[in-house]
Amino acid sequence: MIAFLRSALFALIFYVGTALMVLWAIVLLPFVHAERTVSGYYWARFHRWCARYILGIRTRVEGTLPPGQYFIASKHQSMYETMEIILVGDKPIAVLKRELDTIPLFGRVTRQYGTIPVDRTGSASALRAMLKAAAAAKKTGRSIMIFPEGTRVTPGEQPPLQSGFAGLYKAFGLPVIPIALDSGVVAPRRRFVKRPGIVTMRLGEVIPPGLPRDEIEARVHAGINALETNPNP
């Protein structure tokens, strides 16, 4: 019952706060000299505060993000890491499904922050648009965040990477940092009730650009699943 009440309070405060922050970004940011990433950064900070002080969920980061621009490839078990990696990864541009990019008002704010929308229809025009957005993203000097499995999974699941990952890896020409995590233990997908605990994010070794498709997919798959296969190194 306590976990349910805490989850309900989190939902109320976080989603009402998110709506207010979206309106703030729409109304004020065009008139102030602010960095493009400010809206996403403060949204992520707000989410971390709500998770920590309402739900009792904290993050433990193992490893350090080196200076430079990277292709950050992360495991995806919960909504939690969608915001947390904005902070851990130093405000990376996000690769996300186009449906999120087209939500009224919210989509405009995400585009302002920096996104690469992916159209899952896989048409030639959709691919060209994605690669054009990817090229523009690389020029910013910011890292790029992607969930290469394509969707949230439950702890223990290790699906193959989506086919588009290797194409983006080749197009970016950036080194890759895989992130393994276990957020699904405390904040499982499609579950309203979340429980207090510590989410571990393990930053793997830097993988160089230019590897063959089979090798990059194998190394990233192993890296993002490190907590599934080797929880106690």
Image (cartoon, rainbow, N blue to C red):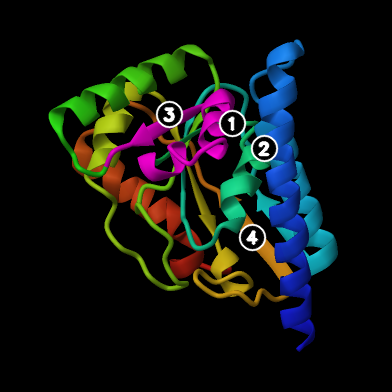
Residue 109 in the magenta stretch? The answer is yes
The three-letter code of the residue at mark 3 reads Pro
What distance separates the C-alpha of mark 2 from that of mark 3? 33 Å
CB within 8 Å, label 1 to label 2 = yes
The label on residue 109 is 1
Q: Nearer the viewer, residue 147 or 213?
A: 147
- Of the numbered discs 2 and 3, the one sitting upstream in the chain is 2
Q: Measured along the vertical axis of the image, is residue 135 above or below residue 73?
A: above
What distance separates the C-alpha of mark 3 from that of mark 4? 22 Å
Residue 186 lies left or right of residue 211; in this view the side is right
The residue to which callout 2 is attached is 22
Quadrant housing the N terminus: bottom right
Q: Residue, x 15% and y 34% (percent of image)?
A: 123
CB within 8 Å, label 3 to label 4 = no
Q: Secondary structure at mark 2?
A: helix
- Of the numbered discs 3 and 1, the one sitting upstream in the chain is 1
Task: Give the residue at the far left of this rendering.
Answer: 124
CB within 8 Å, label 2 to label 3 = no
Q: Residues within 10 Å of mark 4 (few under 14, many from 20)?
A: some
Q: Measured along the vertical axis of the image, is residue 72 above or below residue 67?
A: below
The three-letter code of the residue at mark 4 reads Thr
- Of the numbered discs 4 and 1, the one sitting upstream in the chain is 1
- Of the numbered discs 3 and 4, the one sitting upstream in the chain is 3
Q: Residue, x 51% and y 35% (percent of image)?
A: 107
The residue to which callout 4 is attached is 200
What distance separates the C-alpha of mark 4 from that of mark 1? 29 Å
The label on residue 175 is 3
Region of the chain picked out in magenta, as a range:
98-119
User: Residue 213, percent across and down?
Assistant: 21, 38
